[in-house]
Image (cartoon, grey):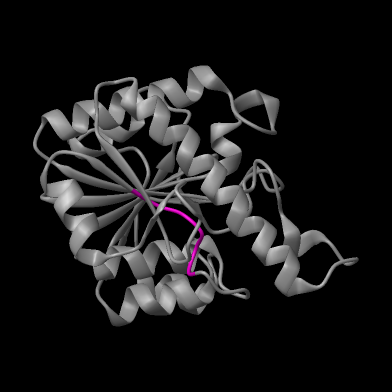
Amino acid sequence: MRRILLKLSGEALAGDKKHGFDEATVKKVAAQIAEVIKDGIQVGVVIGGGNFWRGRTSENMDRTKADQIGMLATIMNAIYVSEMCRGEGLQTAVFTPFSCGSFTKLFSKDEAVSCMEAGGVAFFAGGTGHPYFSTDTGVLLRAIEVEADVILLAKSVDGVYDDDPAKNPAAKKYDEVTIDEVIAKNLQVVDMTASILARDNHMPMWVFGLNEEDSIVNALNGKFHGTKVTV
């Protein structure tokens, strides 16, 4: 494994608080990222914004404006987790697809790859920069652009199921599933646009629970307990 793109759920970063940041959770994530980099793996990170904003559930706002607020939520998350990584002695850069003054850098594949090759963490915030596209699409787009080997999807659920395990205790968890099956059965690993991007660009995804102890490190050290989505 040479280069990974880690997708962190915003909700998972909130821990039991369900909103905002749980600092202990984020520090554990930063420590794991540092350990992965020490093992020689290059790391990029995309973070969702659900711990602050889920605009798609609002029926009282223009969709474009709601999505723009969501993009800003992902930038707040990226800056916060970036600082936690700096506390672990790592260099970081936050890239966005639109200008945010001095807060972030405008996305450049060359600069992002250089950051990762130098042992830093490249954060990709702001989604695609356009409404109607989720952070799922953003993570697939950036993973393809920076030529990642795999996407690690760290979620609040520990893998891919054939039904919602929160509503159906008998839901079956997959150890491995193809992207074609994900699309055909609408298993919602990522949204449909992102699923098709993964299929067409042969980008594998590993889905696992962020709350499992050392889950990110374990996933890359052969102790993976989630679901591998193959292409």
Q: Position of residue 122 (x, y in %)?
A: 29, 48
Asked if 186 appears above or below 89 in the picture, the reply is below
Q: Residue 125 lies in magenta, yes or no?
A: yes
Highlighted magenta segment, given as a residue range: 123-128
Q: Residue 82 lies in magenta, yes or no?
A: no
Residue 43: tell me if it is visible: yes
Q: Position of residue 153 (x, y in %)?
A: 40, 49
Q: Position of residue 120 (x, y in %)?
A: 21, 39
In the picture, measured across the screen, residue 97 lies left or right of residue 87, that is: right
In the picture, measured across the screen, residue 1 lies left or right of residue 52, that is: left
The main secondary structure of the magenta stretch is loop
Residue sitting at x 61%, y 49%: 73
Asked if 40 appears above or below 179 in the picture, the reply is above
Residue sitting at x 66%, y 64%: 68
Q: Residue furthest front?
A: 101
In this figure, what is the number of numbered marks? 0
Q: Residue furthest right?
A: 60
In the picture, measured across the screen, residue 38 lies left or right of residue 8, that is: left
Quadrant holding the C terminus: bottom left
Residue sitting at x 61%, y 31%: 14
Tell me which corner region of the image, top left, top right, bottom left or bottom right, holds residue 63.
bottom right
Residue 157: tell me if it is visible: no
Residue sitting at x 64%, y 47%: 50
Q: Nearer the viewer, residue 26 or 192?
A: 26
Asked if 21 appears above or below 231 in the picture, the reply is above
Q: Nearer the viewer, residue 205 or 67?
A: 67
Q: Nearer the viewer, residue 190 or 148?
A: 148
Q: Position of residue 2 (x, y in %)?
A: 10, 50
Asked if 176 appears above or below 167 in the picture, the reply is below
Q: Residue furthest bottom?
A: 200
